[in-house]
Every structure is written in C-alpha cells, then in structure tokens.
C-alpha cells in the first residue's frame, strides 16, 4: 500500500511551540511527515538553515515517522520529489487565511495532484509566530512557554549583549523609581 506522505514546509526561524504542536498533530494523521525548511537566500535569518535543522531534529527525534529536511525552489516540486501527496500548513487565525488560501490555490494550479491540508494549533499558540518570538527575544523579553527550552537557550546565544546584561540589572525605569523613593525617604 502507498504511504501517505506529507511535507510541512516553512521558515522555522526559530521553531516555536506552535510548529511543534502542528508536527505532533500531523504525525498522527500521516504515515510520514517531512518537516521541510526553506533555504531562502533572500531572507536575512536569525538562525542559519543548519541551526534550524539541528533544532528541529533534536525536537522531533522521538517521532518515528517525522524527519527534517531542507529545500529550495518550489514547495510543490520538492513535495513531488519526496513522494508526498499533501502539504501541511497551520492556520492560527482568520488573518492567516488569505495568504494561506493564495498559496494553496497557487500550489494547486502548479500541481493539481497535491492537496494542502490545514490544521489548527492549540488555541494557546494562536497568537504565536516566529517573527514575534525573534522580536521579543531580541529586545530582552521572555519567550518562556512559547518555544522549547532548546530554542530558548539558542535564542539567548543570539541576543544582543546589552539585553543579556539587562536580564540581571533592574530596568532603567525601576532604577530611577528606586532613586526617587530613596530621595523621598531622605526628604
Ligand atoms: O513559514 P513560512 O515563512 O510562512 O513558510 C512559507 C513557505 C516556505 C511555505 C513559502 O514561502 C513557500 O512555499 N516557499 C517556497 C517557494 C514557493 O513554492 N513559492 C510559491 C508558493 S505558492
């Protein structure tokens, strides 16, 4: 019998808990799921493709039917190359729908034999995106619970040293508040 293979294409810069939630769901309905990282020379990523692949491999190693790969060119051509019949994509909110619909219909025009399958991640991840995770982490905010610990550690390694220091020092406003309250006490 033919295996029901799907690819889950994306940038994964970095992988989030939302991606992992979708991988878990996808691994249950497909015989094989290929997490496919786009090698996009136009983008200026935070993590290199090999760093993202290493993270995803470590994070999905416990699924016997999930593997991680990288690709360039058209997603549909890659899907056909690996023998996939479906493209898995996540839809978080209505705002994702228009872009995802355009991609799905363009992919259908290019390769009518491929189906795009949409799945919804858990509600708690519905506002989560790699872009926001990058921004919050780079500005010194906490991304705990939004990305796996491994990704959190790797994000820390990429942080601007100024924000790393900020983790241990009180924020500027707090410092000036402390000064003000000391001055009030003295007065
Ligand atoms: O995680 P992302 O950035 O939303 O993933 C977008 C991705 C990689 C699925 C999309 O950009 C893509 O398929 N790129 C490959 C080139 C391609 O096939 N373009 C036509 C899409 S209709």
Image: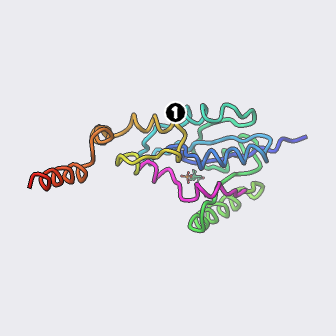
Q: Is 114 drawn above or below residue 3 in the view shown?
A: below
Q: Residue at x 58, y 42 (%)?
A: 37
Q: Position of residue 165 (x, y in %)?
A: 28, 38
In the image, the residue with mark 1 has its CB under 8 Å from the nearest atom of ligand 1: no
**Numbered marks: total:** 1
Outermost right residue: 1
Q: Residue at x 67, y 64 (%)?
A: 105
- Give the quadrant of the N terminus: top right
In which quarter of the view is residue 33 placed? top right
Query: In this view of the protein, which residue sits in the foreground, 169 or 60?
Result: 169
Q: Is 132 drawn above or below residue 96 in the view shown?
A: above
Tell whether 39 sits left or right of 103.
left
Q: Residue at x 69, y 45 (%)?
A: 7
Outermost left residue: 187
Residue wearing tag 1: 50
Query: In this view of the protein, which residue sits in the foreground, 77 or 44?
Result: 44
- Give the quadrant of the C terminus: bottom left
Asked whether 182 falls inside the magenta stretch, the response is no
Q: Which residues are magenta?
A: 117-135
Q: Position of residue 22 (x, y in %)?
A: 66, 49
Q: Residue at x 69, y 52 (%)?
A: 88
Q: Position of residue 85 (x, y in %)?
A: 77, 49
Q: Give SS at disc 1.
A: helix
Q: Is 59 drawn above or below residue 73 in the view shown?
A: above
Tell whether 170 sits left or right of 85.
left
Tell whether 175 sits left or right of 119.
left
């Amino acid at each position: 019998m033919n295996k029901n293979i799907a690819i889950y294409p994306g940038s994964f810069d970095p992988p989030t808990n939302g991606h992992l939630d979708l991988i878990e769901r996808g691994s249950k309905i497909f015989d094989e799921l290929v997490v496919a990282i786009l090698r996009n020379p136009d983008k200026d990523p935070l993590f290199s493709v090999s760093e993202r692949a290493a993270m995803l491999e470590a994070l999905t190693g416990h699924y016997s039917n999930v593997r991680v790969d990288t690709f360039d060119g058209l997603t549909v051509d890659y899907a056909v190359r690996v023998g996939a019949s479906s493209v898995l994509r996540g839809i978080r909110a209505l705002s994702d729908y228009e872009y995802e619909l355009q991609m799905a219909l363009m992919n259908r025009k290019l390769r009518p034999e491929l189906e795009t399958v949409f799945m919804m991640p858990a509600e708690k991840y519905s506002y989560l995106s790699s872009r926001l995770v990058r921004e919050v982490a780079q500005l010194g905010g906490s991304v705990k619970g939004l990305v796996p610990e491994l990704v959190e550690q790797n994000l820390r390694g990429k942080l601007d040293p100024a924000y790393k220091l900020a983790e241990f020092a009180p924020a500027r406003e707090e410092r000036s508040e402390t000064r003000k309250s000391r001055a009030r006490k003295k007065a």
